[in-house]
Image: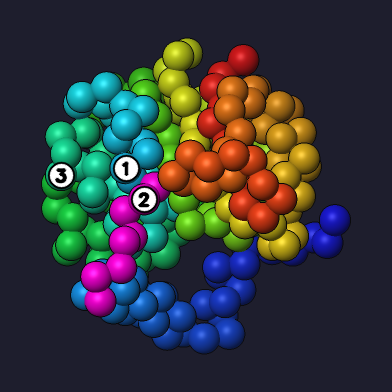
Amino acid sequence: MEEHGNLWTEALARDPEHSKNYAQRWRRLEEAGQDIDGEARLIDAMAERGSRILDAGCGTGRTGGWLAQRGHTVVGVDLDPHLIEVAREDHPDATWHVMDLGQLDLRQPYGDRIRFDLVVMAGNVMTFVATDERQEVLRRIADHLYPDGRFVCGFGAGRGYDFEEFFADAEAAGLGLDLRLGTWDVKPPSEDFLVAVLSPR
C-alpha cells in the first residue's frame, strides 16, 4: 500500500482553482443532460420516506440535494468550503457543513450525537482520504449510524485502495459487509468498481 495524505487538499495546493473547476464540470454535465443522479436513486430506493441521510464527502451536493428534494432530511459534509458554498446555493433544502470526515462529529444542540438511517459516500471519496485516516473516517461514520442504519460507499479500482483492504478497514471500524455490487445501478460485483452496503456490528 502506497501511503498518501488527503488527495483533495493536495490537489488544491497544486491548483487553487481545482474546486471551482470541479463544480463547473458537474454543472456542465447536468446542462448537457447527463445522468448524474444514479447514486441518489439507489439510496432513495433503500430509504424509508423521510429518512435521515448523511452525504459524506458531499462535494457540490448533487447526491444529497436530490435526496432532500424527495423529502429526506439530509446533512452533507465536505472539507472544501467552495464546494459547500455551491451546495448551499444549489440545494437549500439540505443542511451543509464544512468538515473533514476524519473529524466528523455532528451533534444535536443538547449535545447528543446525530445519527442517520443511511450514510452515502459517492464519487470515490474514500480513495481521497489520507491512508492513515481511513479507519478513523469509517469509525466515525459507524458512530453516526443508528443500530439498524446502513452505510453505502462506492469507488473505483486502481485508486490506491484495494477493495479487500477497504473491507478489512471497515471491519476494524465496526462495520460489516451486507452486500457487494459492481455499480450504483445494482449490477453484479466486478473488479473495476465497488459499491458496498455495510452496517454496524
| Identity, as a three-letter code, of the amino acid under mark 1 | Arg
Characterize the magenta stretch by its predominant secondary structure.
Answer: loop
Q: Is residue 37 magenta?
A: yes
Residue 95, quarter of picture:
top left
Res 67 quadrant in image = top left
Image quadrant where one finds the N terminus: bottom right
Residue type at mark 2: give it. Gly
Counting residues from the start of the chain, the first of labels 1 and 3 encountered is 1
SS state under label 2: helix
Q: Which mark is residue 123?
A: none
Q: Residue at x 67, y 55 (%)?
A: 192
Residue 144 to residue 32: above or below: above
Looking at this rendering, what residue extends furthest in the right direction? 1
Disc 1 crowd rating (10 Å Cα; few below 14, some 14-19, many 20+) is some
Q: Say which of marks 1 and 3 sits in front.
A: 1
Q: CA distance from mark 1 to mark 2?
A: 5 Å
Q: CA–CA distance between discs 1 and 3?
A: 12 Å
Magenta region: which residues?
32-39
Query: Is residue 123 a member of the stretch shown in magenta?
Result: no
